[in-house]
Image: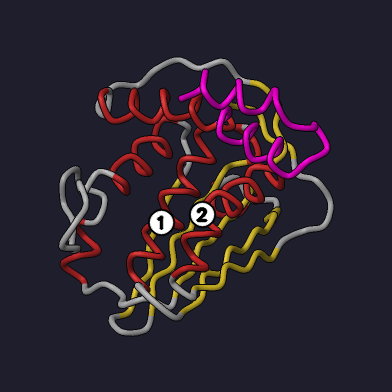
Amino acid sequence: IRGAVEIIRDEVSPESKQYEFATILIDETKRLNEVVENYLNLAKKQKKKDVPYQINEIIQSSVLLISNQAKKNNIKIKVNGPDFPIQLMGDQNDLQQILINLILNAIESIKEDGEILIDIEQISSGKSDVESNGLKISVNDTGSGLNEEEIEKIFQPFYTSKKTGSGLGLAIVKRIADSNSWKINIESVVDVGTKFVLMIPINKN
């Protein structure tokens, strides 16, 4: 796939939209390898190289990749956050994979006609705990919601409340969060919607 897309990209102008989309496809084939490795190594913790990256760019990229699917289902995706850039240290694919999985989960929960709101907030209270100091990313949807039993099982591998799906998407989210010492929480009300909250401690990044 990557080789074919590289050939196509070489035939178009770097200023064109087709060139931009081809570049996204090439980048996504690289990430696809890591996604497969995540599934195959679900229980393993792997050492990764930490590099600086901009969270704003990762969120925009994640939304762009899924925007077409959301549009087909008449689902709006909105992002609220600081205008200034926020830089983290780590593997940017970890955050992107979490965001993509959470947004896809929200789309599947809504099915049609709804809204997904992504909130980004920096928290600094002077306290030492993760919830009081860090980066808070919330993914809110207006979907079908979950009951208490489903909430308790939602991060378990192979558990799914949907008719289709592997039941690994949110398990991967939890594994990635745990491997980075991030916290992921869920709030949900049946027939109202679901909110996933990812906390990234400042002192870790």
Segment tinted magenta in the rendering: 1-27
Residue nearest the viewer, comparing 66 with 39: 66
Determine whether label 1 and label 2 are within 8 Å by CB: yes
Q: Residue at x 65, y 31 (%)?
A: 23
Q: Nearer the viewer, mark 1 or mark 2?
A: 2
Q: Which quadrant of the view contains residue 13?
A: top right
**Which circle's residue, 1 or 2, is located before the other in the chain?**
2
- Residue designated by label 1: 104
Q: Main secondary structure of the magenta part?
A: helix
Magenta run includes residue 138:
no
Residue 75: x, y in percent?
A: 49, 73
Left/right of residue 204 with respect to residue 1 in the rendered view: right
Quadrant where the N terminus lies? top left
Q: What separation in Å lies between label 1 and label 2 (alpha carbons)?
A: 8 Å
Q: Residue at x 80, y 31 (%)?
A: 14
Quadrant where the C terminus lies? top right
Question: Where residue 61 is drawn, which disc sits there?
Answer: none
Residue 47: x, y in percent?
A: 45, 15
Magenta run includes residue 24:
yes
- Residue designated by label 2: 66
In the image, residue 194 sits, relative to residue 98, either above or below, namely below
Residue 102: x, y in percent?
A: 43, 54
Left/right of residue 81 with respect to residue 167 in the rendered view: right
Q: Which colour style is shown?
A: secondary structure
Q: Secondary structure at mark 1?
A: helix
Amino acid type of the residue tagged 2 in the rendering: Ile
